[in-house]
Image: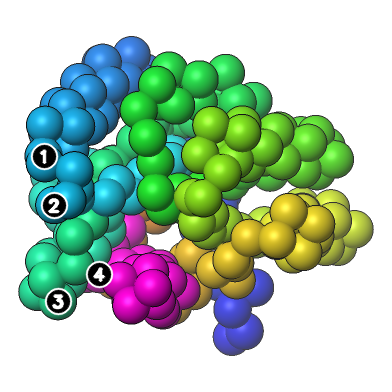
Amino acid sequence: MNNKSKYIPLFLAFFLTLSGCEQATTTEQVATEQQVQNDTTTTAQTPKNERTKTIVFFGNSLTAGYGLEPDQAFPALLQERIDSLGLPYKAVNAGLSGETSAGGKSRIDWLLKQPIDVFVLELGANDGLRGIDPASTYDNLGTIIDKVREQNPEAEIILAGMQMPPSMGQRFTKEFEQVYTRLAKDKDVALIPFLLEGVAGEQALNQGDGIHPTIEGQRILADNVWTVLEPILVANRAS
């Protein structure tokens, strides 16, 4: 079975759980905003010559760690690696279950009230599963990137790529995948080719809903992100 054929049952299950994710959005958004506020306040209180830089993970339920404890989601797992290397970065999980690229475009402004040094953008999967025109997803994600750059010109930006199942049609799946490769080139940002590589379609790595990664699945997501993130953090430390 190839990777794409594995996505069919996985993403069919997603339609059954999508509404459940959205019902948790309000409570989760309040918690997320409070976490960002607390983390950035701590950063601002650090002496300038010892300033801890901020990495914001801006995404949906995959970033939020839906169904898991906060310390089991991949941003928290990456924080452990960052700490083990003594890198001066604080990971902020700004994931929100059910988020679309349009929702992210509306939500990004309050987040930009505090400085961001590294921005990891993980949105678009919910757009694809709802059949939203990939051109709209491209525009929304591009606007988010532009807004981050406008407020934080020196910020490093990483885009997490996503893919759709073949059941949504060859033309749509190709156009959707190209949203990320085009954006990475057009906006000159680093690209994680497919965030769910090694996890999508693997029953043992997903929760009972068939779509949200288990703890072990989140560890693989952390590996996929770390491959792109680590060189950026190390290079910035050396510069």
Which quadrant of the figure contains the N terminus? bottom right
Q: Is residue 38 above or below residue 208?
A: above
- Evaluate if marks 1 and 4 touch, with contact meaning CB atoms under 8 Å apart: no
Inspect this view and state whether residue 144 appears: no
Which quadrant of the figure contains the C terminus? bottom left
Left or right side of 66 for 142 = right
Q: Secondary structure at mark 4?
A: helix
Cα separation between marks 3 and 2: 16 Å
- Evaluate if marks 2 and 1 touch, with contact meaning CB atoms under 8 Å apart: yes
How many other residues sit within 10 Å of disc 2, few (<14), some (14-19) or many (≥20)? few
Say which of marks 3 and 4 sits in front. Answer: 3
Of residue 180 and residue 9, the one placed in the foreground of this image is 180
- Give the residues in magenta: 213-239
Q: Which residue is identified by label 4? A: 219
Residue at 37% over, 35% down: 115
Q: Residue furthest bottom?
A: 1
Q: Secondary structure at mark 3?
A: loop
Occupied quadrant, residue 164: bottom right
Cα separation between marks 2 and 4: 30 Å
